[in-house]
Image: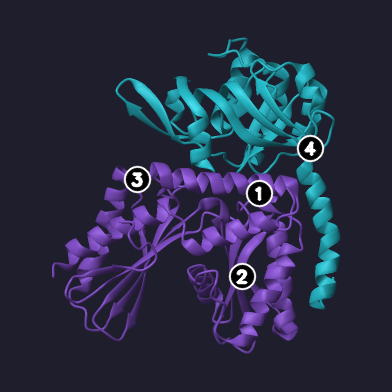
Chain colours: A cyan, B purple
Amino acid sequence: MAVYHLKTPISEEEIRKLKVNDTIYITGTIVTARDQAHRRALEYFKQGKPLPINLEGLAVFHCGPVVSKEGEKWVAVAAGPTTSTRMDIFEDEFIKNFKVRVVIGKGGMGKRTTDAMAKYGAVYGAFTGGAAILAAKAIKNVRGVEWLDLGTPEALWIFEVEDFGPLTVAIDSHGNNLFTDVAKAVEENRKKIYEKLGLQL
Amino acid sequence: MDIAKVVEDVAFNLLKQAVIYLPEDVKKALEKAYAEETSETGKTQLKAILDNIELAEKYKAPVCQDTGTIIFYAQAGAEVRNLDKVEEALVKATRRATKEIPLRPNAVDPFTQKNSGDNTGRFIPYINWEIVPGDSLELTVMTKGGGSENVCVTGMLVPGEGINGLKKFVIESVIKAGAQPCPPTILGVAMGGGADIAMKLAKKALLRPLDQPNPNPEIAKLEKELYEAANMTGIGPMGLGGKTTVLGVHVEYAFRHPASFPAAVAFNCWAARRATARIHADGSVEYLTHKGLV
């Protein structure tokens, strides 16, 4: 279980070194995207329209931040992760088309995303759910915001971050998925629990 | 005293205390979990939680970006006058807290999908009333996170299975919830009453401090048994594996119909936010959970 400090843009080679249970911290640029932004980005790609920002080598963050505007400047007040499973239907295409290297969220993602991460070289970094201030304090600058018409939680927020983390590598680029591993272990443990409580399966 | 004014100020302060400062018993339980966790990944998650709690206190910012659904519990002394003014005062306090702290606006009309923008709307904030002897008013606020709310369950169990049916129901609910409710969680478990009564009791059980087992020793034993069983699942902090899945299990019960065994499991995320104060007849206020943090 190694600790890595990565700087964006992150190369495929760097990503391939990471294994599940490693801890990573990111310095550079991360971009938020939830359901609506994923959908629009994929529509843009289909139409051959460029995205407002080139995502190659960057991290996409499943997050609807609490932001406030101080004068002309946006500030991230609280920015914890949202549940990633909702983005499972978009993420494989998203990774393939835009070459993001890290997907940040909570709760994990499914087989489709895991397969895409193995094929194109990306990892899923689990950020502690609810740790909103820890996240906000690593955001040193809000570089910009795009697609604000989707509403503040759904817009593309471009954050400049310093040592953003800790992120636990929960899906690596070799087909390993920590959430699947935990689910298997839980299945095994269920038997022991039933035994201990004197219950029948 | 001007009850409307006092209640509004007290409720505003309670909201502020609750969203910024986790109760001492929750912090202690998280610290203990961090010390005892054997999974390195689990330890990393618990450390991030503890760091986040410290930063929230330092910057006086809400501990989580999901400031939850706002629920009040009002224990009104039978001699308190003008109680009809309390509801409006709680709504006003909620609006003020949303703007000034700030809180994320979390009240959405389920029909139009429109967010009211100020955490108020039909039945929200929700107020649970209880009438007790005396002349003081005790107010508790719970700001209940959405992720943990999404896995709360009610079940109508088979009476013939008795308490074993309940144990099974609780364990299966914890396994099914997995990483979703932001573990380590606190479980409120209730049996009996009816479908609505069980959930109401389960949710209220979340208010009980973690260091207070049920006063009935048999029920306290069941709490301990369920606590140990839930932590054997291996779900761990944030569902990434480890031995800390729950920080505590609180069980409550009501008598049941012979043909029914209603049960409910209410989950609260690690950010288990609550605050309580008592308003005395002379208008003086005693903050019970967050002394010196107004």
> Secondary structure beneath disc 2?
strand
**Which numbered mark, 1 or 4, is in the foreground of this view?**
4
Q: Nearer the viewer, residue B107 or B146?
A: B146
Q: Which mark is residue B238?
A: 1
**For the residues marked 4 and 3, what is the alpha-carbon distance in whole angstroms?**
46 Å
**Mark 4 touching mark 3, by CB under 8 A?**
no
Q: Chain of mark 2?
A: B
> Secondary structure beneath disc 1?
helix
Residue bearing the label numbered 4: A1
Query: Which is nearer the N-term, disc 3 or disc 2?
Result: 3
**Which numbered mark, 3 or 1, is in the foreground of this view?**
1
Q: Chain of mark 1?
A: B
Q: Residue at x 54, y 24 (%)?
A: A161
* Label 1 Cα neighbours within 10 Å, binned few <14 / some 14-19 / many ≥20: many
Whether discs 1 and 4 lie on one chain: the answer is no
Query: Which is nearer the N-term, disc 2 or disc 1?
Result: 1
Q: Amino acid at mark 2?
A: Val
Q: Which mark is residue B116?
A: 3
Q: x%, y% of residue A35?
A: 57, 33
Determine the residue located farthest toward the front in the rendered image: B35
Q: Amino acid at mark 3?
A: Ser
* Label 3 Cα neighbours within 10 Å, binned few <14 / some 14-19 / many ≥20: few
Q: Which mark is residue B261?
A: none
Residue bearing the label numbered 2: B249
**Which numbered mark, 3 or 2, is in the foreground of this view?**
2
